[in-house]
Amino acid sequence: MTIRAYLWGMRISTLVAVACLGLIIRFINPLKDGILGQALFYVSLFFSVTGLATLFLFWLRRLFSKNETAYLNVGISFRQGVLVALAVAAMFVLQSFRLLLWWDAGLVIVGTLLIELWFLSK
């Protein structure tokens, strides 16, 4: 698969995920639909943030690194996009239980950074 095909697939799937997230926010009431409505929201949020973060981080990486190969940048950007999406989804889950405070968000961010540093050290 070429990088161009991967990026177009990522763009299209991100647009679909963002559209699904918008439809879920518009038509699903988590108080009435229960756990299924919340699960759909969190899954669509995860995929939306993953796509947006991956595309943005790949764009930044390609903008600032001239001598690296683009193929390596795609994998790193995807991993970092997934980690950003996990952090955002974790903060949304904490907020849904009314447990999100600034130090909890800081712990989620520090935990995400530590995971990324572990990946970078390998």
Image: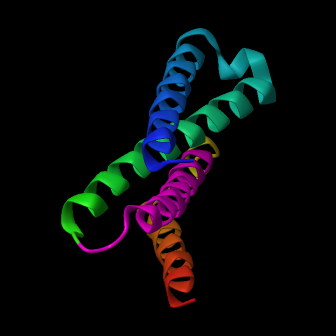
Report the magenta residues as a range: 67-93
Figure check: 29 above or below 65: above
Q: Nearer the viewer, residue 58 or 31?
A: 58
Q: Is residue 75 magenta?
A: yes
Question: Could you tell me residue 47's position as x and y percent?
Answer: 58, 39
46 with respect to 110 (left or right): right
Quadrant of the image for the C terminus?
Answer: bottom right
63 with respect to 42 (left or right): left
* Furthest-front residue in this view: 2
Residue located 61% across and 32% down the image: 44
Residue located 49% across and 26% down the image: 18
Q: Is residue 4 magenta?
A: no
* Total number of numbered discs in the rendering: 0
Residue located 60% across and 18% down the image: 24
Question: Could you tell me residue 106's position as x and y percent?
Answer: 44, 69
Q: Nearer the viewer, residue 63 or 26?
A: 63
96 with respect to 69 (left or right): right
